[in-house]
Amino acid sequence: MKVIVGLGNPGMQYARTRHNAGFLVLDRIAAQVGGVQWRRRQRGKMAEAGQGVLLVKPQTYMNLSGDCVLQVSRVRRIPASGFVIVLDDMDLEPGRIRVRSSGGSAGHKGMQSIIDRLGTSEIARVRVGIGHPPTGVDPVEWVLQRPFGEELECLKMGTGLAAEAALSVIRDGIELAMNRYNRTPTGLAGA
């Protein structure tokens, strides 16, 4: 079994915020698969997406995402190499994505929690661009706001690409997914 973990915060007040890009990507995958039923288990919401793929939305709040991921790893006996983490990234413009096989957290507290709890940074991840906050706007406030207008459209494009990329990591392997989705400035596979 392979697990795609989308990072975000539970609760309606955080729904559709920039920081919940990971949840939005899992919603896109679930919509593509169809008939997905979310259930609460191991401190998260989980759904089978067919072909040995489990979707997980930690319900621990962002900074404790690793608690859920560690429980899933232990209960289902899945090593760190069996996970693909989907998260927001302020260093990428909205609409862009980046696939990585490993690395640090780049300051993302949800990713850092997962690295700390699993004891390794060798974890595949798909980063979804949300852009930098405007001058004078606190980054914490920025990530917890909802995008609108053109930015929202770019985020929708990015979450769609990220859904494709996460599934590609599982189907085709990390190297092919990186080559396919990281090769163009816009992250478009067909460009």
Image: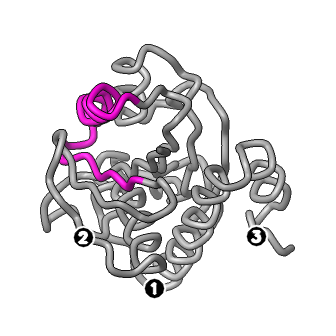
Sequence-wise first label, 2 or 1: 2
Q: Residue at x 79, y 43 (%)?
A: 175
**7 sits left or right of 175 in the view:** left
* Secondary structure beneath label 2: loop
Sequence-wise first label, 3 or 2: 2
**What's the distance in space between the residues labelled 3 and 1, CA to CA?**
21 Å
Q: Position of residue 156 (x, y in %)?
A: 50, 77
Q: Residue at x 62, y 66 (%)?
A: 164
Q: On the image, numbered disc 1 is attached to which residue?
A: 149
Q: Nearer the viewer, mark 2 or mark 1?
A: 2
Q: Nearer the viewer, mark 3 or mark 2?
A: 2
Q: What's the magenta region?
A: 54-77
Query: Above or below — where is 154 with respect to 79?
Result: below
**What's the distance in space between the residues labelled 2 and 1, CA to CA?**
31 Å
Q: Position of residue 65 (x, y in %)?
A: 28, 36
Q: Position of residue 100 (x, y in %)?
A: 66, 39
Assess whether residue 119 is covered by the magenta stretch.
no
Which mark is drawn over residue 37? 2
Which mark is drawn over residue 188? 3
